[in-house]
Image (spheres, grey):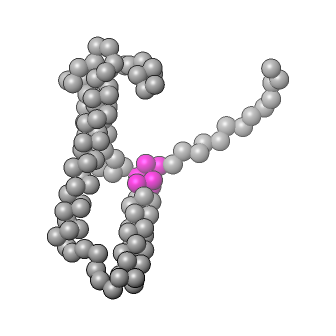
Amino acid sequence: MNEQKYEKVDKTINLLRANLLSIIFLILVFGINYGLYYKIWGESIGSVINDTYSCILIIIFIIIHEIIHGIGFCRADGVNWKDIKLGFNIKTLTPYAHCKISISANIYI
């Protein structure tokens, strides 16, 4: 194997910045879709009640998504539900599921 000099470049993005960018992107995509729908069909796509209902559903599905991660962690040997921590990091606007004990990387395969 030839030894070559490589320069390590950090390409990570701050979680808060990533989440804020995704929220902006989401608003833009929905805004464009709503605008096109209104222009084509001449009527509004939803109401305040439907928008509130949709936001509640999104929050519920995010919670279910993190619970599914927790269930996946429980598949590892020796991991019980009490070893799983579910939460929300307000600093980075990130929901999470975390296994408190070490598990093999093979559980992800």
Asked where in the image residue 42 lies, by quadrant, the reply is bottom left
Pinpoint residue 9: horizontal percent, then vertical percent: 65, 42
Q: Residue at x 67, y 37 (%)?
A: 8
Q: Is residue 105 visible?
A: yes
Q: Residue at x 24, y 52 (%)?
A: 59
Does residue 34 sit above or below 54 in this rendering?
below
Pinpoint residue 102: horizontal percent, then vertical percent: 37, 19
Q: Which residues are magenta?
A: 14-19
Asked where in the image residue 2 lies, by quadrant, the reply is top right
Report the front residue among 94 and 27: 27
Task: Kindly give the residue lying farthest to the top in the view shown.
Answer: 78
Asked where in the image residue 83 lies, by quadrant, the reply is top left
Report the front residue among 80 and 101: 80
Pinpoint residue 11: horizontal percent, then vertical percent: 59, 45
Q: Residue at x 60, y 42 (%)?
A: 10
Report the front residue among 36 and 63: 36
